[in-house]
Image (tube, rainbow, N blue to C red):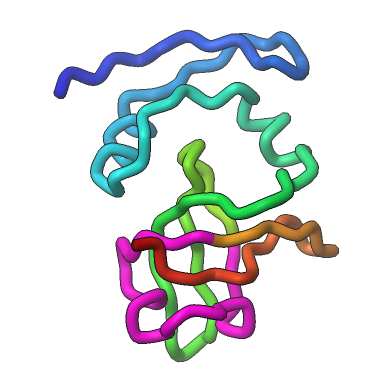
Amino acid sequence: MNYKDQLVTCEQCGKRFVYTVEEQRRQAELGLPLIPPTLCPTCRREAEPRPGLHPGVVKWYSEEKGYGFLIQDDGTEVFFHRSGVTGDPERVLQEKAPVWYEVKKTERGPQAYNVHERE
C-alpha cells in the first residue's frame, strides 16, 4: 500500500496538521481503517471522550504494573488499567489484540474501561 502524508484541517480549531505516513502505517498494521483524524493533536488531547464503544488495539500491557495502552481508531493512545478489563484477560491483554472499549475522563486524562475482545 502506498502511504503519503496528508494535510488535514482540524474541525474544531481550524489549524492545519499532517496525518503522517507513520500514523497511517501503524493503523494499517493494527487492522484499523485508514481514516484521517478530524481533530489536530492538541484538540484530540483536550476533547471530551466520545460516548459508546470504540474499536482499538492493545499497544502493550504490563502484567507487573497492571496497566497498558490501547491504540484508538484515530491512531492516538489511551491508558487502561487491569480493573477496566471485562473480557477474557487471556485474549484481551495480548499485544495487538483487537478490542472494544469505552472512555471516561479522569483527573489524569482519558482512560479506557469495559475493555473486551473484538470478534
Identify the image quadrant of residue 19: top left
In the rendered view of the protein, which quadrant contains the N terminus? top left
Q: Residue at x 50, y 48 (%)?
A: 72
Q: Residue at x 46, y 90 (%)?
A: 64
Magenta segment, which residues? 79-100
Picture coordinates of residue 17, whole percent (x, y)? 55, 16
Identify the image quadrant of residue 28: top left
Instruction: Say if 15 sits above or below 71 in the image.
Output: above
Q: Is residue 93 magenta?
A: yes
**Outermost residue toward the right in this view:** 107
Instruction: Say if 114 sits above or below 47 in the image.
Output: below
Identify the image quadrant of residue 59: bottom left
**25 lies left or right of 35:** left
**Outermost residue toward the left in this view:** 1
Instruction: Name the foreground residue: 18 vs 70.
Output: 70
Instruction: Name the foreground residue: 99 vs 105.
Output: 99
**109 lies left or right of 18:** right
Q: Is residue 83 magenta?
A: yes
Q: Residue at x 36, y 28 (%)?
A: 34
**50 lies left or right of 54:** right
Picture coordinates of residue 107, whole percent (x, y)? 84, 63
Q: Residue at x 45, y 53 (%)?
A: 56
**Outermost residue toward the front in this view:** 119
